[in-house]
Image (tube, helix red, strand yellow):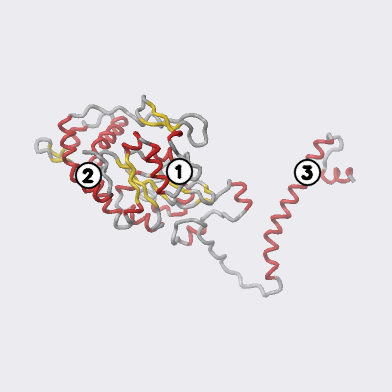
Amino acid sequence: MGQRLNRCLDVPVALPPLRRRLLLLFIMLFLWLYMFYSCAGSCAGLATRGSPAPPRATPPLPPLLPGEPGEESSLEEQRAAPDAGSPISSFFNGSGTKRLPQAIIIGVKKGGTRALLEFLRVHPDVRAVGAEPHFFDRNYERGLAWYRDLMPRTLEGQITMEKTPSYFVTKEAPARISSMSKGTKLIVVVRDPVTRAISDYTQTLSKKPDIPTFESLTFKNRTTGLIDTSWSAIQIGIYAKHLENWLLYFPIGQILFVSGERLISDPAGELGRVQDFLGLKRIITDKHFYFNKTKGFPCLKKAEGSSKPHCLGKTKGRTHPDIDQEVVQRLRDFYRPFNMKFYQMTGQDFGWD
């Protein structure tokens, strides 16, 4: 019988016995899997056998994937959703399901959003997109299916996240996120607006060394001391103004405000608040951090998926240029009333004055 089987399978008789057995086992396993998945499709129709066949029609739309915060989506978006129920699909594409994010870090630029995201990714129940999707400000016309496809696969109980700091200052972003899910949790990392503006300028200066000085960009007219609020580096720091737009769509309790300063001085403490806000077990603690004196901020002892220490890249922790202290003081005076209002709105004193 073994010779007949070898002839049918075109296996040379001279094949070593061990390799012949392994080949036979592989073929039997393949046939078993083929029969199993073929039966899974055909056996489902046994219950309706004998009843008249219904007229051919467009297949029904699949429901939204379990655990997604989405409320409604277009036909195209639902059809474009990945087939989470197929065992073969799960096998080849990796376990888990792509879901729309349940939490988003919406701002602010140069506040510490990258550090927060990298720290959070250490948590086993957090899965996040590394790059900034810019969906709700630049790519909204691509649709939710495109956005969802950017997300990492998550298992039951894990949280999908992304961060795009420009959302906080984008007028359309609150309504768009609310339309996706009114229950989305929002995180804003804020920092002394004067320091933030200088950091913003420093980043631009590193890419465009020939830009005007910080002092000249700060004022519409330096003689009169009129601050140029149209300059984005200044405008972003008027947190109270931007927050008003978000509160039209989300309750204040659904937004967590993280201190960029405390994220440096006490990263474990701020991460504790974030984990509580997201409903996660407090796994990220002091043991995960060490302070890098060269960069001037905390680094991870072990990054996500690695056993090696990890600090943020060379673009983080740049040395700021020396700014005229008179200009710095005028900016502090300018921001003070906005800061006071922001403290009142959030119920937190960030100590910037």
Residue 307 x/y as whole percent: 52, 31
Amino acid type, callout 2: Asn
Label 1 near label 2: C-beta < 8 Å? no
Residue 323 sits above or below residue 350 on the image: above
Q: Residue 25 carries which label?
A: 3
Residue 273 sits above or below residue 293 on the image: below
Q: Residues within 10 Å of mark 1 (few under 14, many from 20)?
A: some
Which-is-in-front pick, marks 3 and 2? 2
Amino acid type, callout 3: Leu
Left/right placement of residue 162 relative to residue 197 reads right
Residue 234 sits above or below residue 241 on the image: above
Left/right placement of residue 319 relative to residue 55 reads left
Which quarter shows the C terminus?
Answer: top left
Spatial CA span between label 3 and label 1: 47 Å
In the structure shown, which secondary structural element does the residue marked by tag 2 occupy?
A: helix
Spatial CA span between label 2 and label 1: 31 Å
Question: Based on the displayed image, in which of its 4 quarters is residue 212 positioned?
Answer: top left
Instruction: Give the residue pinned by disc 1.
Output: 282
- Looking at the image, is mark 3 or mark 2 earlier in the sequence? 3
Residue 34 sits above or below residue 121 on the image: below
Q: Nearer the viewer, residue 47 or 16?
A: 47
Extreme residue in the top direction: 294
Spatial CA span between label 3 and label 2: 71 Å
Q: Residue 339 carries which label?
A: 2
Which-is-in-front pick, marks 3 and 1? 1
Amino acid type, callout 1: Arg
Could you tell me how many numbered marks the image carries?
3
